[in-house]
Image (tube, rainbow, N blue to C red):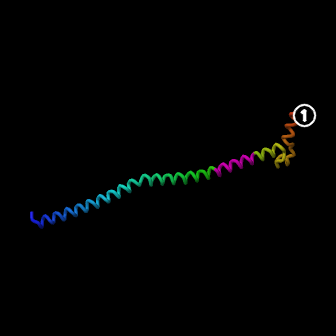
Amino acid sequence: MTDRTADELRELIREGHGLLKDMRAERRAIEQLLDDIPAKVDARIEERVKAGLEVLGEQTKEAMDRAVAKVGREFDRLEAILTGTDPASRRQGKRPLEELFREHREGRPS
């Protein structure tokens, strides 16, 4: 082998080592990116779940508030019927249920 051929081979080997070094660096960069993916996916899932739970919490609170208000209105309506202050009972001239119960308890006919 001539000196010139040996020099060319050494140069090619140096280039090969340089390319190999670059490829190893790229491999490490890719591995680092791949290692970060599960953490990024977990963070994204947690973010979405949190947002969904916040919306669900707000909707649940609104539904509960509506239900409580409805129950309150129903109790008010029943109280008005019992005391005879509801508009329908007053229009029809009905006596309050409270009075009818009292009479029944005391044994007086209505």
Q: Position of residue 7 (x, y in %)?
A: 15, 66
Left or right: 108 as drawn, with respect to 17: right
Residue at the farthest right position: 108
Vertical order, 90 against 13 (above or below): above
* Residue displayed at 84% across by 45% down: 84
Query: What stretch of residues is rendered in magenta?
Result: 61-74
Please tell me which residue lies in front, 55 or 103: 55
Left or right: 48 as drawn, with respect to 7: right
Q: Residues within 10 Å of mark 1 (few under 14, many from 20)?
A: few
Please tell me which residue lies in front, 60 or 17: 17
Question: In the figure, residue 75 lies in which quadrant?
Answer: top right
Q: Position of residue 52 (x, y in %)?
A: 55, 52
Which residue is label 1 attached to?
108
* Amino acid type of the residue tagged 1 in the rendering: Arg
Quadrant location of the N terminus? bottom left
- Judged from the image, the secondary structure of the residue bearing numbered disc 1 is loop
Question: In the figure, residue 109 lies in which quadrant?
Answer: top right
Please tell me which residue lies in front, 6 or 86: 6
Quadrant location of the C terminus? top right
Please tell me which residue lies in front, 59 or 33: 33
Vertical order, 27 against 68 (above or below): below
Residue at the farthest top position: 107
Q: Position of residue 65 (x, y in %)?
A: 68, 50
* Residue displayed at 74% across by 47% down: 72
Q: Position of residue 10 (x, y in %)?
A: 17, 63
* Residue displayed at 26% across by 59% down: 20
**Magenta segment, principal secondary structure?**
helix
